[in-house]
Amino acid sequence: MSKVLVTGATGYIGKRLIQKLLDDGHEVFAILRIRHSGDGFLAHEHLNFIYGDFADVEKMDPIPREIDSAYYLMHSMSDRTRDLEEIERLIAAAFVSRINQTNCQQIIYLGGIIEPNVELSAHMRSRKGVEEVLHQAKCPLTILRASIIIGAGSASFEIIRDLVEKLPLMVAPRWISSRCQPIGIVDVIDTLASSLLNEKMYGHLYDIGGPETMTFKEVLLRYAKFRGLSRWIIEVPVLTPRLSSYWLLLITSVRFSLCSYLVESMKHSSVCEEGNITELLPRQQMTYEQALERAFQKISQNEVLSTWMDAWVLNKENPDLAKYLEVPQEGCLKNVIRRNLSGNREEVLDRIWSIGGKKGWYGYDWAWNFRGFIDRIIGGTGMNLGRRHPTEIKVGDSIDFWRVIKADKEKGHLILYAEMKVPGEAWFEAIVDETTYQQSAIFRPKGVSGRLYWYLLLPIHLLIFHKMAKQISL
């Protein structure tokens, strides 16, 4: 049994990799930024949590000295690119300083394929910068660079699905003809797991992709064929990367930073050129259509383990994450509603635990959707078009534009933190005892603009939240 450290543990890749490593018999130490966010994982005797943020390394829990290998899966998808490279390098350097105090024998880093001899975007430069910093560790580094990843909940899959499902006719930039090798998420996770303590891979770089090379245009058209849809794509020369990102923002559920990252990546080919990992780790890889089939199976069976929405978006610089985990009492404006339960407590809890997504918010859903639309227009997360599971809630889940920070169904206590753009900070709290339902909307305003925002919307909020409380407590 190897002792394995996993950073980015709550992310799309991290959650799935942890499950694979545990299934393979390893002991996993998962680093989590949010205390108690480990509640979102299935309990396992060989799963341990280390709390802390490499942006504030002095406050982190200690990393065991006996670590054998470490996965570096931390990637910033912030809209801020001005100092992105510097921030990513500082975080990677903090990681290296901690790893150098352990017996770690290998670092495994997952990034994106970088086409040689091209001008890189800020995101891709930051990825390359992280590689350079990780090379400074005492132990050898294994670098894996992936093409676009296809799996239920991946940002690439969700963008492809939204575009093809919603648009019979697409206008796209000419660089939609760039080539790629779509790879199934199962193959990515298996490759990461197979790289663990593989001495032949120490100090080497490998590009990883699926068995087929195609253009991004073919990616869309083959998805359409898979779904039995007729779609047409017209190429035009006038769409800049930023305009393309805004266009995707209007059509897809994925937030702007991810749209921007994907568009910048699409400008260049992401075809495997570095290393020859198929000879080193021979396996039968999924075709593009097989990866799509598996993704839809997982969605239909409500077995999506992780999604692109799992990463927290606090829109703050160097946030103290601990302060968001409890609803504040001071300096807040509140809308508190108490109602006697009309029905069974368990039925009320079921309604609360089904909130958002396709179920909606128990009244005035058009208003919630309009608020989500406005949020996306100004660069926020928007409604994200739903939730991971229709009736199950775990700490760290995303529900529309809310983040779950407490979910104790037995005690009847749910707390959500708003990730929408507001002039302040907002929480939603629901508490159910044997006879009473209490619902609270809490807002901590930032300056005069925050107070104006609260009082201007107060009449609308009173309508929305009173109807919501009435429908839930029936």
Image (spheres, rainbow, N blue to C red):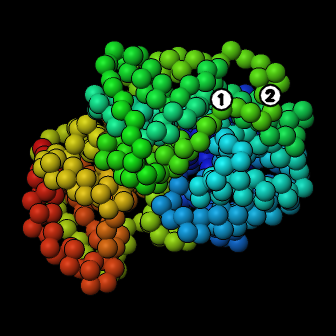
Q: In screen coordinates, is 230 left or right of 336?
A: right
Residue 407 seen in render = no
| Residue 214 image offset from top left, x and y in percent | 56, 25
Query: Mark 1 packing: few (<14 Cα in 10 Å), some, or many (20+)?
Result: many
Please give the count of numbered marks on the rendered protein.
Answer: 2
Q: Name the residue under label 1.
A: 209
Dot placed on the residue nearer the N-terminal end, 1 or 2? 1
Q: Residue at x 21, y 49 (%)?
A: 369
| Residue 84 image offset from top left, x and y in percent | 59, 64
Amino acid carrying label 2: it is: Asn
Quadrant where the C terminus sits is top left
Amino acid carrying label 1: it is: Gly
Q: In this view, does 346 lie above or below 62?
A: above
Q: As drawn, which residue projects farthest toward the bottom?
A: 448
Q: Mark 2 points at which residue?
A: 276
| Residue 120 image offset from top left, x and y in percent | 63, 53
Q: Residue at x 33, y 26 (%)?
A: 232
- Specify the quadrant of the image occupied by residue 439: bottom left
Q: In this view, does 79 lie above or below 295?
A: below
Residue 129 seen in render = yes
Query: Mark 2 packing: few (<14 Cα in 10 Å), some, or many (20+)?
Result: few
Q: Which residue is drawn at 21% across and 73% down?
A: 454
Q: In screen coordinates, is 410 left or right of 217?
A: left
Give the secondary structure at mark 2.
loop
The answer for how far apart the CA atoms under marks 1 and 2 are is 11 Å
Q: In this view, does 387 lie above or below 24?
A: below
